[in-house]
Image: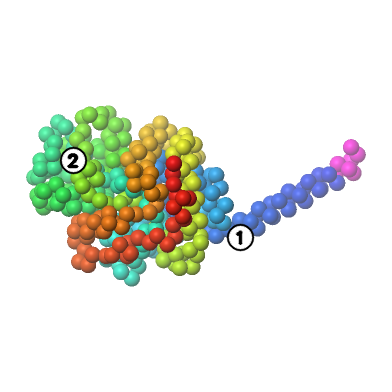
Amino acid sequence: MTFMLLRKTLAAAGVAALALAAAGAAQAKDLVPVKFTLDWKFEGPAAGFLLAKERGYFEAEGLNVTIDSGNGSSGAVTRVASGAYDIAMADINSMIEFNASNPGQAMKAMFVIYNAPPFALFTLKKSGIDSPEKMVGRKLGAPVFDAPRKLFPAFAQAAGIDKEQVTWESMDPPLREPMLLRGDVDGISGFYFTSLLNLRGLGVKAEDLNIWTYRDQGLDFYGNGLIASPKLMAENPQAITGFLRAVVKGWRDVIADPEAGIAAVKAADPLIDPALEMDRLRMAIDNNVLTDEVKANGMGGIDEARMEKAIEQVTYAFGIAAKPAVADVFTAEFLPPQAERMLQ
C-alpha cells in the first residue's frame, strides 16, 4: 500500500468513526432522561435494575436511565417528592405516611417489587424472648426511619400486645446488629435479608435467633415498589410503562441467572462481597419477589382486597386520621400487559 493510499484509508476510517460517534450521540440525545434512585446501597436486590440497564433494556424503551444508590426506603420517597429523582424504589407504606402529612405532594405507587415485605423482628434466643408477648417491658432498636420499626404498632396489634409497653432506641444502621449482640437492646427490627446476613457476618447463626416476619404475623403489607413523580406520570406515561417493561425483563433475567445479576451489582460497586450478595439476592427472590401471588398474576400489580386491608393496618400504625382509598395509593394505569409481567 502506498503512503498516499494509506493516508486516504486512515482518513476514511476517521470520518467513519466520527460519523458513528455522532450517530451515537444523536441517538443518546433522543433518549428520555430518567433519574432513578434505589432504596439502599448497591446490593443483591438491586440486581434486577442494574442488569436491565447493562443489557440495554431501558435504551430499547427510549430511555436514558441513571441509577443511584439510596439511603433508606422511606428516604427514597422524599427524593421523588423533592423533584431530585423521577422514579424511586421506595417503601409503599412510608409513601402513605408521607402523603398524609404532605397532601399537596401526594404520590402513587405504580409497581410492586416486594410483593411480600421483608419486615422482621430479631432477638437472640439466649435473651429468652421467644414470643411477641415477651417483648413487653423490653427495649427494641432500629434507625428512626426503619420501616418495620415505624409499622410496629400494627405488629403489636396483630400480636395482641400493648405497643406502649415496648420501648425503642435509635441508632445509625451500621450499629443496629452490633448493639443487639452487645445487649444494648433486647431486639431489633429490620429487613429480613439485611439483618440476618449482617448478624451472620458477626458470627451469629440463624439457629441462635428468634425471627418474626410481619407477614407471618398476619399483616398484609406490600413492601417496596416503584413510585414516580406526578410530573412524569402526567407528561410522559409512555416512558413510565417502558421503564416498567424493562424492569420486568431485568428481574426475569436475574431469576433465571442470578450470577449475571450479581456481576452487574459488582460492576456498580466493586467492593461488594459477591457470595454475600448472592445470598441476599436469593433471599429477596424467594421470600419477597417471587411469591405465589406473583407466580399466578405476574410482577408489579396488586390484589385490591389485600391492599385495602394493608391500608387499614398502615393507617392504624401511623395514626393517620383519614384512611386513603386504594386508588390514592396505587395506580395500575402504567402497567404493561399481564402476559409481559410474568416471571416464569
Q: In this view, does 220 lie to the left or right of 262?
A: left
Q: What element carries label 2?
A: strand
Q: Which numbered marker is on residue 271?
A: none
Q: Main secondary structure of the magenta part?
A: helix
* Residue position marked by numbered label 2 in the rendering: 187
Q: Is residue 330 left or right of residue 337?
A: left
Q: In this view, does 254 lie above or below 333?
A: above
Relative to the observer, which residue lies in front, 64 or 290?
290
* Residue position marked by numbered label 1 in the rendering: 30
- Local crowd size for mark 2, using a 10 Å CA cut-off: few (<14), some (14–19), many (≥20): many
Residue range in magenta is: 1-7
Q: In this view, does 102 lie above or below 308?
A: below
Where in the figure is residue 167, as x and y percent of width and height? Answer: 13, 48
Residue appearing at x 71%, y 51% in the figure = 20
Q: What residue type is labelled 2?
A: Gly
Q: Looking at the image, can residue 318 be seen?
A: no
Residue appearing at x 30%, y 69% in the figure = 103
Nearer to us: label 1 or label 2: 1
Residue appearing at x 22%, y 43% in the figure = 216
Magenta-span inclusion, residue 338: no
Q: What residue type is labelled 1?
A: Asp
Residue appearing at x 25%, y 51% in the figure = 220
Quadrant in which the C terminus is drawn:
top left
- Local crowd size for mark 1, using a 10 Å CA cut-off: few (<14), some (14–19), many (≥20): few
Where in the figure is residue 150, as x and y percent of width and height? Answer: 23, 53
Magenta-span inclusion, residue 4: yes
